Image (cartoon, rainbow, N blue to C red):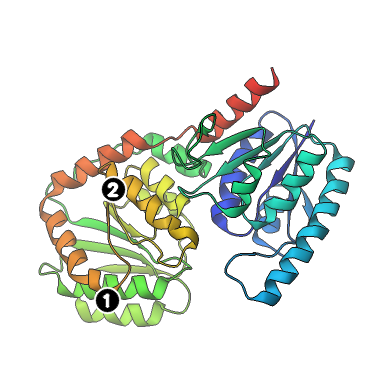
């Protein structure tokens, strides 16, 4: 039996689909993956041994008029190529995790009457998933109430198996009487701005020995940040990109990060308190709403991604280095809202549909 995964664009769409695909594979299902050539999704899926099939797609929103025209042409081309692919491989169903890549294959699935299951990672659904939600067999959502309608299945966000396994063994330890480990995730988007806010705040805290920092700087900012840490006299370790995120989460007491859906899911499963800086130019401001979900549940603090937040971040870092019970309360809040069995729950619901 064959199933078709449709996912691509960014890691936030690809890795949840990968987590679900790995669960499908445990059932001895044949996995095909539809995405773009020379892409992250191709690299990831082929590494797992999945049958990779190609389509063409371009983002539509936030682009100039010429790119919009090209994206429409690619959409039409992708629709017809998807019809051919689906007809040829005859999947039992299609699982899609959104992004601009998913729209044409999703419409093709509907036209060919192939069951279509979609998953939305963010608190505000993307354009493709908004459209496909009207054509889908079942809708899964990572944040409760994202679609604002009945019948949607709230399952959380599927995350990497190595993090789930480590989370099972990661009982929140007491922070009493020890120096705290700060994990800073200056990822690929807006990393320079976030790095600057963090460095300015660390420079203002009174006790420079209160924190030990592991800082993911992103490309192009590492040398400058290294010089600043040395000048401050704070113990630190810098990484352009952290490969073993499970270990980084496990060793941290507090995480400073953007508010991408997958980062939030991983933080919650690892029971880590966080200070979140939503990416201000994220489409539909979805990172702000992602972050507010954690704040409302007492699991995170949320600050504006601007220099106005330097003093607030300084205050939080000084407060949390002293009031460690507050960190433990935030950790317990994470535990209450995490959904570590997301991939398995998606499979259970799909199984139920076919019974």
Depth check, front residue: 128 or 157: 128
Q: Nearer the viewer, mark 1 or mark 2?
A: 2
State the quadrant of the C terminus: top right
Left or right of 288 in this view: 202? left
- Give the SS element for disc 2: helix
Answer with the quarter of the image where residue 54 lies: bottom right
Determine which of the numbered discs, if any, sits on residue 295 in the image: 2
* 82, above or below 93, in the image: below
Whether residue 354 appears in this view of the structure is yes
**Residue placed at 64% from the left, 40% from the top?**
134
**Residue placed at 55% from the left, 45% from the top?**
120
Write down the residue under mark 1: 229
Q: Position of residue 163 (x, y in %)?
A: 46, 44
Whether residue 50 appears in this view of the structure is no
Left or right of 319 in this view: 120? right
Determine which of the numbered discs, if any, sits on residue 58 in the image: none
Q: Residues within 10 Å of mark 2 (few under 14, many from 20)?
A: some
Answer with the quarter of the image where residue 276 lies: bottom left
């Amino acid at each position: 039996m064959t199933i078709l995964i449709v996912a691509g664009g960014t890691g936030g769409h690809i890795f949840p689909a990968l987590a679900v695909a790995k669960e499908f594979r445990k059932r001895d299902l044949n996995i095909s993956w539809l995405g773009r050539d020379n892409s992250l999704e191709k690299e990831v899926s082929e590494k797992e041994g999945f049958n990779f099939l190609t389509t063409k797609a371009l983002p539509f929103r936030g682009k100039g008029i010429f790119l919009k025209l090209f994206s429409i042409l690619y959409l039409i081309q992708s629709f017809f190529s998807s019809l051919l692919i689906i007809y040829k491989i005859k999947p039992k169903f299609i699982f899609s995790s959104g992004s601009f890549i998913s729209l044409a294959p999703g419409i093709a699935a509907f036209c060919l009457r192939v069951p279509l299951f979609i998953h939305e990672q963010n608190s505000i659904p993307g354009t493709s998933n908004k459209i496909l939600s009207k054509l889908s067999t079942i809708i899964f959502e990572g944040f409760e109430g994202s679609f604002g309608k009945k019948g949607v299945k709230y399952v959380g966000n599927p995350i990497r198996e190595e993090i789930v396994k480590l989370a099972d063994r990661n009982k929140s330890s007491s922070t009493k009487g020890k120096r705290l480990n700060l994990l800073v995730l200056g990822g690929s988007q807006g990393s320079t701005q976030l790095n600057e806010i963090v460095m300015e705040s660390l420079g203002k805290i009174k006790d420079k020995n209160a924190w030990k920092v592991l800082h993911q700087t992103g490309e192009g900012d590492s040398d400058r940040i290294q010089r600043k840490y040395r000048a401050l006299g704070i113990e630190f370790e810098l990484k352009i990109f952290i490969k073993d995120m499970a270990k980084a989460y496990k060793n941290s007491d507090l995480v400073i990060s953007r508010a991408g859906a997958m980062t939030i899911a991983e933080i919650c499963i690892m029971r880590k308190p966080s200070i979140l800086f939503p990416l201000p130019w994220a489409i539909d401001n979805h990172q702000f709403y992602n972050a507010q979900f954690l704040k409302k549940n007492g699991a995170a603090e949320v600050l504006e991604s601007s220099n106005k937040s330097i003093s607030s971040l300084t205050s939080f870092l000084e407060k949390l280095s002293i009031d460690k019970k507050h960190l433990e309360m935030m950790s317990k809040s994470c535990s209450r809202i995490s959904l570590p069995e997301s991939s398995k729950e998606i499979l259970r619901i799909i199984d139920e549909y076919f019974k």
